[in-house]
Amino acid sequence: MAFVRDTITLYKRDMLIFKANLRSNIVRSIIFPLVIILFFGSIGTTVIGTPVAIVNYANNHASTSLINSLESSSNLQIISITDQNTAMAMLRNGSVSVVIVILQDFPSYSQKSVDLYYSNAQQTVAGPTLQVIDGYIAKYTEMAQPAQQPGTGISANSLYATKGSYKDFLMSGIIGMVVIFGALFGGGLALITDIQLGYMKALFVSPIDKNAIMVSRILSGSTQALLYAFTAVAVGLLAGANIAMGFAAIPYIILIAILIAIGFQALTMLIVIVGKIRKPEIFAIISQTIGLPLWFISGGITPIYSLPSWLQAVSVVDPLTYANEIARDAILVGFINTQVLLIDGGILACFSAFLVALLLMIFKPTIE
């Protein structure tokens, strides 16, 4: 009971400090997403090695030649040549970004002879990929009907009803970024400030549960993280981005913001405690050296598969990767698979729980 009372008291204190600097905190949370969405969102993205699955219903010389041509393209990576059910399952679970279905009438101009399927989560690659595939298909369909304009033999189909854009892609990744930077200020940097001002010493000699010190800071930081996350979403919407799930995406945004905030606040405070860091500038260098690379390799600004293979392997152990998957399904796809949510959410929860437990274990013997 004393632990709960002390935690609430310290939480109120931290939030009052946040409120006293509300203007600067809000401005800081707006600058990052605004610059990234407005600058990068207008230039789009070019990708290489888009993972593709092919379904070949034609099974003729032209379709075989087309597949061989697609396999030789550096812009595409043919993952599988399979049946349509398997290919669509691969698309839904993220194994491939595009499914090419070569219909029985290929090559033909009288009707569509190739279907292209993609998820809105891969809208950023659909345009460039469509152009590459269309160029190869045109060669064969021109041979079937030279008088027609090239490229009319392909039909692009989004799996979902909404239209995605690179701004949508960026907005989903920026949520994690602003929460991380919020953790830097609300976690480790705030702890350094309290140590410098002597506030931590006062807490050590006061009759309170010492674990409440860390827990209250994590709770207040998570509250601030929610504000940062929704500020980033608001900036994205004003800049022209869209959310496929609409208001239904709010619970998922709250979930990933809280889980990321808890984990990274615990991490930043561990860095301060274990490293005995007492200078804000040193902490800023160390924390940003960790935070920025984690954001980049998580697919925050470009699809993971467009990264070098060794970075793709590293992204598997990056907790932000799983947060981005949830955010992109909510913002771009408009549907979240329950199994994916449980796996990604479970990984984030384990990451946060482990760091919090480690923080509470190390805090007292290290600081006291």
Image (cartoon, rainbow, N blue to C red):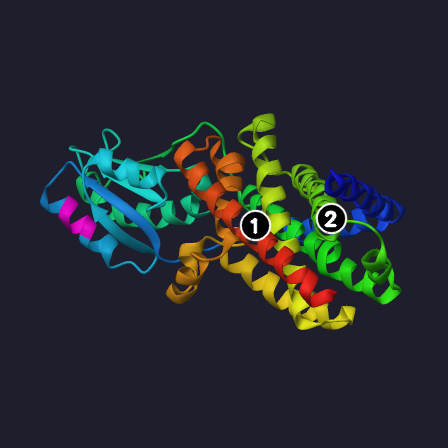
Depth check, mark 2 against mark 1: the one in front is: 2
Q: Quadrant of the C terminus?
A: bottom right
Q: Position of residue 306 (x, y in %)?
A: 42, 58
Say if 25 sits above or below 110 in the image.
below
> According to the image, label 1 marks what residue?
352
In the rendered view, does 75 fall on the left or right side of 65? Answer: right
**Residue with the most extreme left position:** 60
Q: Which residue is nearer to you in this view: 114 or 355? A: 355
Location of residue 184 (image quadrant): bottom right
Q: Which residue is nearer to you in this view: 239 or 295? A: 295
In the rendered view, does 326 fall on the left or right side of 107? Answer: right
Location of residue 274 (image quadrant): bottom right
Q: Which residues are magenta?
A: 63-67
Residue at 56% x, 50% y is 352
- Callout 1 environment at 10 Å: few (<14), some (14 to 19), or many (20+)? many
- Whether residue 240 is visible here, answered yes or no, is yes
> According to the image, label 2 marks what residue?
212
Which amino acid type corresponds to the residue marked 1 in the rendered image? Ser
